[in-house]
Amino acid sequence: MNQLVTIKGTKSGIILVLEPSAPFPILSDEVASKFKEASSFLGNKNMGLIIRGRSLSDDEESKIVKIIEDNCDLKIFCVIDEESGAEKFFEHVVQEPVVNTRGMDSSVESDNVTAQSGDDGNNALILKGNLRSGQDVSCKQSVVILGDVKPGANVISYGSIFILGELRGNAFAGAGGDRNAIVMALNLNPLQVRIADAIAISPDAEKGPKLKFKKKKLMGNENGGEPEVAYIEGDHIVKTAYGASFLRQLNN
């Protein structure tokens, strides 16, 4: 008899394989049992989660994440979609402790979030929540934002910037002069994006250097395509799909 639930570990995080025909309540109980049993082995980490075997509704997915966190010391900061280029990103980032900036979605904390430590290029600051107008994030390492960056919000990093949501505010990557830094978002529509000494503004703006499209027909998320990325090409900042083609270029 096939196992109802199987747990595997990868560089991207945890792979949870679910038996496709089993009732969800039975799977839920089995997930709880498996993660409780493996708790000491899994340790206390911040991990991405990949779910295979069956499609879950948003509500079922949320319940699975809660069951995992209730039965071990793992913190699931994101459910990774294997069909998007986002999974490739997680393979190259060492997850640092998640900062749950509730002030990014409410007024209970400061409008500014600053990280001073961890300027190693292999580390990333991970923030949970939407960044609203008037709020700033500034850090020396790369930054991952699990939410949207709204108009009027600013993200500054000496490394790269990864936004698992929509970028509609301002992003400044490679602030220390790194022209190899990138800005990635699931939807990349910034008011302004800077990388090192290059700057570009929204194509809708009246004046200034415009953000250029690498391809005239960019496959966006509305078409089920890849996330989007801005990077320096020559003297300009260009925008293209964050997919296999870009990753091959990045590794060359």
Image: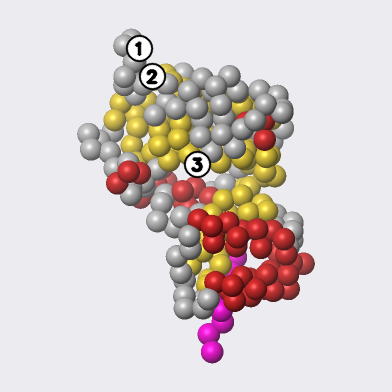
- Tell which of 96 and 246 is nearer to you: 96
Secondary structure of residue under mark 2: strand
Span shown in magenta: 1-9
Q: Are marks 2 and 1 in contact (CB under 8 Å)?
A: yes
Residue 201's disc is: 2
Q: CA distance from mark 2 to mark 1?
A: 7 Å
Residue 249 in view here? no
Q: Is residue 54 left or right of residue 154?
A: left
Residue 238 in view here? yes
- Tell which of 169 and 9 is nearer to you: 169
Height in image: 132 above or below 34? Answer: above
Residue 164's disc is: 3
Height in image: 250 above or below 178? Answer: below
The local crowd at label 2, few if under 14, some if 14 to 19, many if 20 or more residues have their Cα within 10 Å, is: many
- Quarter of the image with the C terminus in it: top left
Q: From the top left corner, tell me how far across and down residue 225 is, in percent.
A: 33, 47
Q: CA distance from mark 2 to mark 3?
A: 21 Å
Residue 208's disc is: 1
